[in-house]
Image: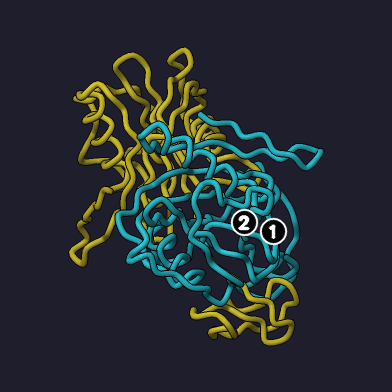
Chain colours: A cyan, B yellow
Amino acid sequence: MNYCSSCGEKVSFVVPDGDNRLRYVCTSCQTIHYQNPKIVTGCIAQWQDKILLCKRAIEPKHGLWTLPAGFMENEETNMQGAARETAEEANAQIENMRLFCVFSIAHINQLYTMYRGDLVDGQASPGEESLDVALVTEHEIPWQNIAFHVINETLKRYYQDKKQGEFKIHYGDIIKQSNDSYIVNYF
Amino acid sequence: MNYCSSCGEKVSFVVPDGDNRLRYVCTSCQTIHYQNPKIVTGCIAQWQDKILLCKRAIEPKHGLWTLPAGFMENEETNMQGAARETAEEANAQIENMRLFCVFSIAHINQLYTMYRGDLVDGQASPGEESLDVALVTEHEIPWQNIAFHVINETLKRYYQDKKQGEFKIHYGDIIKQSNDSYIVNYF
């Protein structure tokens, strides 16, 4: 951030009076431009013994597989966002949605919320941001070609719960280690 | 938003190519300035049969009571944010934190996450944004002077769960009606 989005003057990076963090503050109109984490919302769409995966047509992780998910938008609910992303990325409708997990990923300033739900009529096809979509069983999951660690974690917990016959709501922190591996702290 | 925070030129409010929503887009460097919901995170701090409330020293709702909560910051986890807000607003430390509820409030573009936890040593005092703090029993809650509807809902669910002897994770949407009342849809 270089300029004030309100008045167009230069911003400085300082700790405002009464605050304890560095913020971008306009040198002219004094507007404080707060920057906060974003919410990613998505879902596990179930159909018989399968779930829906999307092959990414965009960066990052072009060509790898993921669950339909994306940034929550203003003027929608968290659950509506998850359903919208599933519609956009996989032309798929979801019903009976239930919150499944909430992950903090502090190193990228994101909060992930993932739902599970039933894929209506088993219908899906690639949206603009997907090269392909697939309905896969647990044994068909391409574990080595999943785009993001948070999706690996979500899927792992999903199949653990499924085996135990009860779905819970999971929450925890995904922490990146210096060697590019991850620790996941569940609470 | 009037100006591009990257280059300082004017922005226009248009639907970018390949998108389906109005965004602020720079007329010069083409940067798209996305605007997304913010996360509010806070907690119910328990001490014996009491919980901690804060009397707001700032607008909105100056002078009304609330749970310690505020905007999640970059580079922290959701739970760390809840603990930080409790420290800032009530000089209080919390342990054994557990996720308690997640509310979408689409009309103000916020996602509320509230934890419950134990107040360490029963110690609390007003922080800069609080006029006062109080440890109150259920019967002492000033229901008519609670700052925000989401806090009313959180407290209501908390005491319902407490009576039933089991705390769950609740999630739902808080929808503002035209007559300034609210509907809460739980899932």
Quadrant of res B69: top left
Mark 2 is surrounded, within 10 Å at the Cα level, by few (under 14), some (14 to 19) or many (20 or more) other residues, namely: few
Which chain hosts label 2?
A
The type of residue carrying mark 1 is Tyr
Mark 1: which secondary structure? Answer: strand
Residue at (52%, 31%) from the top-left corner?
B83
Side of A23 where B141 appears, left or right:
left
Residue at (64%, 63%) from the top-left corner?
A30
Which chain hosts label 1?
A
Residue A35 circle label: 2
The image shows residue A48 at horizontal and vertical percentages of 37, 54
Mark 2 or 1 closer to N-term? 1
Locate the N terminus of chain B and report the quarter of the image it occupies.
bottom right
Question: Separation of disc 2 and disc 1 at Cα?
Answer: 9 Å
Kindly identify which residue carries mark 1: A24
In-front residue for pair A113/A32: A113
2 vs 1, front mark? 2
Q: Which residue is situated farthest in the right direction here?
A: A179
